[in-house]
């Protein structure tokens, strides 16, 4: 089990969000909040550095476009490499949560 | 890396992205400066940024104390320069080797022998992969003039000389055994790179042209070995065909310490005359010379510093 699985949860959330289509940073926080039933609030201070990091790693790519209210916004899009990583992260996450669940039931 | 160089543009982009987010949330955002710095760090190669900062810092410190900096630079320059000078000296004196194919396998017999005896030795010798003969010429005059400017250093060489040394001409071809058959029948020369550059202005069509040479004589010491001294080594004012040009650095008066004298050189076939010292290994070969023809000079075998 990788040590940084919990840390990687943010990446998983972002990648999964972008798998549905391109989105800007604010849109990503909104989607994660809404889709988690207002349970997961992603901090800007975590999200934006994470987006930059994933962009450097080639998991996502960014371009400037007009937003719905006609302002310039930076839209992020999943790359092929990112899609592959998403599949991996999902497996890792499921294995991890299953392990925790097993543990809790035993105890 | 690119991001490190276009830092201003990166900062503007980050600023704009953060501003967009704030506009969507009525200005609510965490620690804007901290987030922007983290974003920048994630987009750049941090060690490279730090390296640039260190460089800038170093330059500032140097600029603040120009006197000390100048002295430091000067001492470094002197140190490096002195080392380089000493090395190039050592390189010339100790490390440089003759510009031939296998200088470590070259030996010099500096006995004086008539050409015919050299030929016989060459035919009988089995100890060497090749035996070439050569004699140095003095006072070869170029263009028939008495002007000392037109005097050249030259060598009479046996036809296999260049083959034995394993050197190829830069242009044209070298003398071969075929150019060394009948006395006087081969008015042909190979010239040095320096001669080609200097006197012929690097003429690319030099091969096949002729050069008028005359008045050469064997260097004293070479001519006392029992061959006929009265025959001219180079007939006066004869045209010689230029067969080839040797590469830079290959000189008729060659020496391991790369003396600069004799930079304008010619080589010509020796078959027009007698010459040469090559005899030491007569006893090494399978046969020996007839008793009526004993060695003229005591053999000396030594490492060549020149050829």
Image (tube, coloured by chain):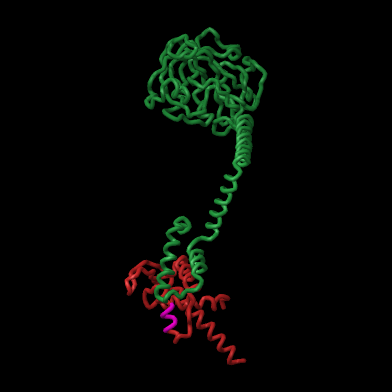
Q: Colour of chain A?
A: red
Q: Residue at x 62, y 30 (%)?
A: B89
The chain whose colour is green is B
Query: Which part of the image, by quadrant, shows the N terminus of chain A?
Result: bottom right
Q: Quadrant of residue B124?
A: top right
A25 inside magenta stretch: no
Image coordinates of residue B280 in percent, x first then y, are 63, 23
User: Residue furthest toward the front?
Assistant: B26
Image coordinates of residue A8 in percent, x first then y, are 51, 76
Q: Residue at x 55, y 25 (%)?
A: B132
A31 inside magenta stretch: yes
How many marks can you see?
0
Region of the chain picked out in magenta, as a range: A29-34
Q: Residue at x 45, y 10 (%)?
A: B145
Towards the viewer: B154 or A50? A50
Residue A48 against residue A104 in the figure, above or below: above
Q: Report the side of B193 relative to B257 (left or right).
A: left
Towards the viewer: B62 or B247? B62
Residue B290 against residue B44 in the figure, above or below: above
Q: Main secondary structure of the magenta part?
A: helix
Query: Which part of the image, by quadrant, shows the C terminus of chain A?
Result: bottom right
Image coordinates of residue A47 in percent, x first then y, are 47, 73
Residue B128 against residue B198 in the figure, above or below: below
**Residue B104 visible from this viewpoint:** no
Towards the viewer: B298 or A4? A4
Q: Residue at x 61, y 17 (%)?
A: B112
Image coordinates of residue A36 in percent, x first then y, are 45, 85
Towards the viewer: B97 or B270? B97
Q: Quadrant of residue B78?
A: top right
**Residue B260 visible from this viewpoint:** yes
């Amino acid at each position: 089990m990788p040590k940084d699985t919990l840390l990687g949860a943010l990446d998983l959330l972002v990648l999964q969000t972008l798998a549905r289509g391109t989105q800007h940073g604010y849109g990503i926080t909104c989607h994660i909040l809404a889709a988690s039933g207002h349970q997961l609030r992603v901090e800007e201070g975590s999200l934006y550095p994470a987006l930059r990091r994933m962009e450097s790693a080639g998991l996502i790519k960014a371009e400037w476009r007009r937003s719905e209210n006609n302002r310039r916004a930076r839209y992020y899009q999943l790359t092929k490499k990112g899609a592959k990583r998403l599949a991996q992260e999902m497996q890792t996450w499921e294995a991890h949560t299953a392990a925790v669940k097993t543990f809790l039931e035993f105890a | 890396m690119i991001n490190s160089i276009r830092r201003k543009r990166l900062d503007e982009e980050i600023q704009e992205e953060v501003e967009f987010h704030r506009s969507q949330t009525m200005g609510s955002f965490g620690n804007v400066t901290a987030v922007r710095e983290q974003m920048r760090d994630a987009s750049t190669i941090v060690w490279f940024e730090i390296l640039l900062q260190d460089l800038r810092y170093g330059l500032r410190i140097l600029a603040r104390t120009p006197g000390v900096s100048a002295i430091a630079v000067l001492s470094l320059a002197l140190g490096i320069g002195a080392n380089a000078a000493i090395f190039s000296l050592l390189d010339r004196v100790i490390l440089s080797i003759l510009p031939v194919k296998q200088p470590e396998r070259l030996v010099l017999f500096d006995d004086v022998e008539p050409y015919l005896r050299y030929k016989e030795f060459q035919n009988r010798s089995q100890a060497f992969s090749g035996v070439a003969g050569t004699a140095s010429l003095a006072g070869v005059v170029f263009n028939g003039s008495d002007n000392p400017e037109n005097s050249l250093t030259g060598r009479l060489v046996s036809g296999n000389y260049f083959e034995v040394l394993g050197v190829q001409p830069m242009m044209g071809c070298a003398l071969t055994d075929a150019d060394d058959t009948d006395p006087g029948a081969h008015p042909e020369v190979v010239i040095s790179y320096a001669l080609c550059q200097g006197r012929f202005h690097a003429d690319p069509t030099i091969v096949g042209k002729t050069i008028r040479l005359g008045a050469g004589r064997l260097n004293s010491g070479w001519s006392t070995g029992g061959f006929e001294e009265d025959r001219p080594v180079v007939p006066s004012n004869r045209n010689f065909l230029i067969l080839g040009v040797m590469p830079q650095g290959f000189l008729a008066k060659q020496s391991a310490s790369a003396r600069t004298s004799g930079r304008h050189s010619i080589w010509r076939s020796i078959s027009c005359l007698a010459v040469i010292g090559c005899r030491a290994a007569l006893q090494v070969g399978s046969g020996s010379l007839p008793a009526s023809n004993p060695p003229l000079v005591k053999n000396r075998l030594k490492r060549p510093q020149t050829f």
